[in-house]
Image (cartoon, rainbow, N blue to C red):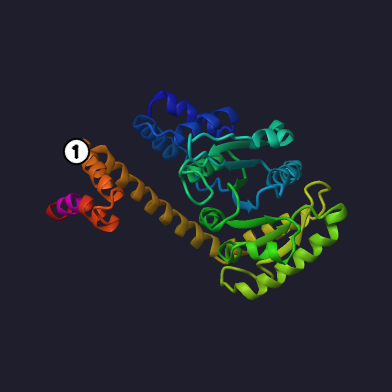
Amino acid sequence: MNNGTEELAARVAAGDRRALARAITLVESTRADHREAAETLLDRLADPSRSALRVGLSGTPGVGKSSFIEALGLRLVERGHRVAVLAVDPSSARSGGSILGDKTRMERLSRDPRAFIRPSPAADQLGGVARRTREAMALCEAAGFDVVIVETVGVGQSETLVSRMTDVFALLLAPAGGDELQGVKRGIMEIADLVLVNKADGELAAQARRTCADYAGALRLMRVRDTDPEGIPAARTVSALTGDGLDEAWATLERLAKWRRENGVLARMRAAQAGQWFEDELRAGLMALLSADPGLERRLADLRAEVEAGHAAPAAAARAALAPLARALRDA
């Protein structure tokens, strides 16, 4: 490890928020030398004794995810927690850019020295999370944050990926009627540990209670798993505006995490998540190797052109592209 990486690791371990931001920028970089330094940094900071409660949060657009996280985060830091928020913003399909506005939407929480907010672009990563969200979580834990909240791009079938890298998963929804309930896909409902109906205040309070009852009924019909204690999945009403229901929602998440930890479920989940991380990195590494060889890159471009022109089937072209790699592996 060079002196710069060693110093950065020491500062991250000491809880320096600026150093943590630099470290996450390093792991998000695609440069080969940065990737090598990032892997060294992560190895240096690996410490099983520093383990945060990892919370995944998704929700429909406009439901108030940022307001909810800020209200909850402020309560948690007041109780002595150190809270990190990894907010994933959607990227433009045309330019690849992202607004990264979550930090400005959580202005009060971002100013608190016991909190850390990091917006990251989703880029072309599916699943509502960024490519390096797992590494960012590990760095936040190494920096001493005991609660890490991952806010996904938005709700949809692909958002299930966040549940495979967190300990508990909450789905934030707005007061709605039957048609809107139909619009929330079964896939994400099946993995939600806690459904929170936000904006349960003022004129929407009664509607929020009815919506919560509807979701509670749907959850009872939908899922029975051995990773859940009695009463999970659950539905609750909350208000990011007034704070009503926030304490109860957090208590439910804590009880669930405690039960999973004490019954060995959390250890199995973390092991499976590590294995999934390895497989994801392996796939990405293979794609990088395929693109690194100039001759193969030209061959891939030619095959793609044949597919786009309708002269070759995608599956057959992909098999032809992988044939040299398959032969090399057989001969090795």
Viewed as shown, does residue 108 lie left or right of 98?
right
The spot of residue 26 in percent (x, y) is 46, 32
Which residue is drawn at the image coordinates 73% and 45% (left, top)?
A: 76
The magenta segment: 323-328
**312 or 262, which is in the foreground?**
312
The extreme top residue here reads: 3
The spot of residue 174 in percent (x, y) is 73, 55
The majority secondary structure of the magenta stretch comes to helix
Which residue is drawn at the image coordinates 76% and 41% (left, top)?
A: 78
Viewed as shown, does residue 102 lie left or right of 4?
right
- On screen, 12 above or below 93? above
**2 or 273, which is in the foreground?**
273
Work out which quarter of the rendered image holds the N terminus and state it: top left
Viewed as shown, does residue 143 lie left or right of 198?
left
| Residue 230 appears in the rendering | no
Secondary structure state at the residue bearing disc 1: helix
- Pointer 1 residue: 295
